[in-house]
Image (cartoon, grey):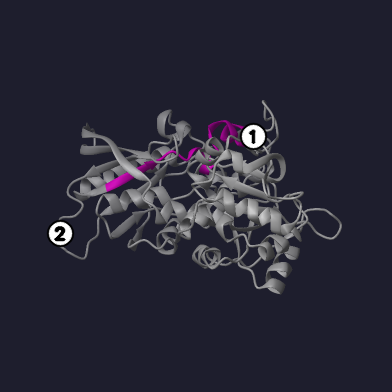
Amino acid sequence: MAIELNTVPEAVHAINRGEVVIVVDAEDRENEGDFICAAEKATPETVNFMLSGRGQLCVSVLPEVCKRLEISPIVAQNDAPLKTAFMTPIDIRSARTGITAREKSETILRMTDESCTANEFVRPGHVYPLLAKEGGVLRRAGHTEASIDLARMAGLHPAGVLCEVLDETGDRASRDSLAAIAKKNNLKIISIEQLIAHRRVSEKLISRAAEAELPTKYGNFKIIVYSVQYEDQQPIALVYGDLTEASDDEAVAPLVRMHSSCFTGDLISSLRCDCGDQLHMALETISKEGRGTLVYLPQEGRGIGLAQKIRAYALQDNGMDTVEANHALGFKADMRDYGIGLQILKDLGLSEVRLLTNNPKKTEAFNLRGFDLRVVDQVPIVSAANEHNQKYLNTKREKLGHKLPTL
């Protein structure tokens, strides 16, 4: 069941005040909720409350902390399903047993002090450090990284305390149970998915890697290749004309196409979709108008990747539609994210655009992201149907809300 979530800024403010928040991950991942607080705010009272979650109390830290404290992975080969990076458990040397909430608090608080050294702790202990990936949830969508991100965003030392929340039977707490716990204890509750989306918008993650002039059969474009921090993807902007120069009609904003990669449609002219047609129609339309940009985003198969898309094709061959096939493979109907694309448009100096799309959700992505970017018009980009993509286009209209004619 869906639960009402707070905003990321609300959770960050709570972390800054030393409060505990609940963070849930994806239902197709661990499907669990964790109590999380900033490590430097881990008082004995806070630790005691978090232990009521019944899970394993851990402290997420960055690599430099592990190096300074001389703590290493507890196993040489981590073959756990989610690769949670458990390090040597420790206790502060002054602890009697290390098991009490006060002793765990003292251990955690000392770990956040950059002057602390390895000889101040004994091992094995009762506080489990977890090695977080640099880059946080943008590198790994886990609670370990989420706790680091929340502490850092709150202006605190980048280390977090986390504890899984179990129900009275010892199983993972359900979404309803987590919502009830949050309400009872006045806790903020957010998802890792929210945190990823927030960071992709609020932090500048892109930089220009290369650019050159690119003559095409549609005219002379400028190609700009971008690097994305913490990610391997390299999105592209194809720019025609001066995007920031006022046109004869100052009310006319530049045309923009946000195009997700489609190897089969874009490169080998597959008839199963309309992607290749839309790509070329967009370039031609932008060229004829005299200015605009096409942002090419590596989000194959509406975000599920090429191999999974071909598996979805096989399911469609057996009677499923595109939405049903994605669901059968364990994915949402549309996994795409436009945060990086919006950052590229801001880098190009845009504030108002006319969006070349049939998908109203792309327009919503602009309006909901908190950017100074406004869609002043949604310009249709409808290609002719064929016998191979007619069912696909009908599904886009009926199940995904695309503005397409009845076929």
Confirm whether the magenta stretch covers residue 176: no
Q: In the structure shown, which secondary structural element does the residue marked by tag 1 occupy?
A: helix
136 on left or right of 247? right
Which residue shows up at 62% across the image and 52% down it? 108
Can you tell which mark lies on residue 36? Answer: none
- Mark 2 surroundings within 10 Å by alpha-carbon count, few (fewer than 14), some (14 through 19), many (20 or more): few
Q: Marks 1 and 2: in contact by CB < 8 Å?
A: no
Q: Which residues are magenta?
A: 293-312
Which residue shows up at 67% across the image and 30% down it? 78
Which of 36 and 334 lies nearest the eye of the viewer?
Answer: 36
Q: Position of residue 134 (x, y in %)?
A: 49, 41
- Mark 1 surroundings within 10 Å by alpha-carbon count, few (fewer than 14), some (14 through 19), many (20 or more): few
Which of 361 and 86 lies nearest the eye of the viewer?
Answer: 86
Can you tell which mark lies on residue 246? Answer: 2
- Outermost top residue: 76
398 on left or right of 381? right
* Residue 25 appears in the picture as rendered: no
Which residue shows up at 44% across the image and 58% down it? 365
251 on left or right of 263? left
Q: Position of residue 86 (x, y in %)?
A: 66, 38
Please name the residue that numbered disc 1 is placed on.
317
Q: Position of residue 288 (x, y in %)?
A: 21, 47
- The answer for how far apart the CA atoms under marks 2 and 1 are is 49 Å
| Amino acid, disc 2 | Ala
Is residue 232 placed above or below 335 in the rendered structure? Answer: above
| Amino acid, disc 1 | Asp
Comparing marks 2 and 1, which lies closer to the viewer?
2
